[in-house]
Amino acid sequence: MGQEFSTAWISPYQVRPDHYAPTTYPEQYGFEEKGVRRKEREMIATPEEMASMKLEPKFRNFCAHKWIDFQTCTRNVYPWVIKCSHEKHLWEECMNDDLTISRKEYEREQRLLLRNDRKERIARLKEERRRQLEEAESRAAH
């Protein structure tokens, strides 16, 4: 607890992407040169399946199908839910992968924002330097 506040004070990055806003760059940005397309993530569980299982909103993510399998197993073998440890492991592994992907997306967005910020700063410095040189030349001409 408190990590968000501590990193806000000591982080060297001045640019931080908003967690809840959509990405500012296209998903394929940076991959065009390589001729590679990023694999688009797909929801396997349909909204109807999630509604029929009465999934809470926090479980309606890319791992919903694994959670549905786990819940179905626990209902079928109750009270011996330990028999569903494999399904639970698959769901936890999927959640871990989902978290890793979201962290990578956040870091990608941060790198692209920093890159854009750096390019703008360099362009401003070049423009300022060009104006200084023009002023020096105009003073030398007088």
Image: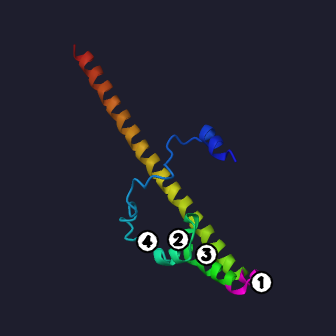
The answer to which of marks 4 and 1 sits earlier in the sequence is 4
Residue visible at 54% across and 68% down in the picture = 60
The answer to which of marks 3 and 1 sits earlier in the sequence is 3
Alpha carbon of mark 2 to alpha carbon of mark 1: how far? 27 Å
Which amino acid does the dot numbered 3 rest on? Trp
Which amino acid does the dot numbered 4 rest on? Glu
Q: How is the image coloured?
A: rainbow
Q: Please name whichever residue, 46 or 42, is drawn nearer the observer in this view of the structure.
A: 46
Q: Can you identify the residue that label 1 sits on?
A: 80
Q: How many marks?
A: 4
Residue visible at 26% across and 21% down in the picture = 137
**Residue 40's disc number:** 4
Alpha carbon of mark 2 to alpha carbon of mark 3: how far? 10 Å
Which amino acid does the dot numbered 1 rest on? Trp
Task: Check whether the beta carbons of the residues at disc 2 and disc 3 lie within 8 A of each other.
Answer: no
Helix or strand or loop: what does disc 4 sit on?
loop
Q: Please name whichever residue, 11 or 142, is drawn nearer the observer in this view of the structure.
A: 11
In this picture, which residue range is highlighted in magenta? 76-84
The answer to which of marks 2 and 1 sits earlier in the sequence is 2
Which amino acid does the dot numbered 2 rest on? Phe
Q: Can you identify the residue that label 2 sits on?
A: 62
Residue 61 percent across, percent down from the top left: 53, 68
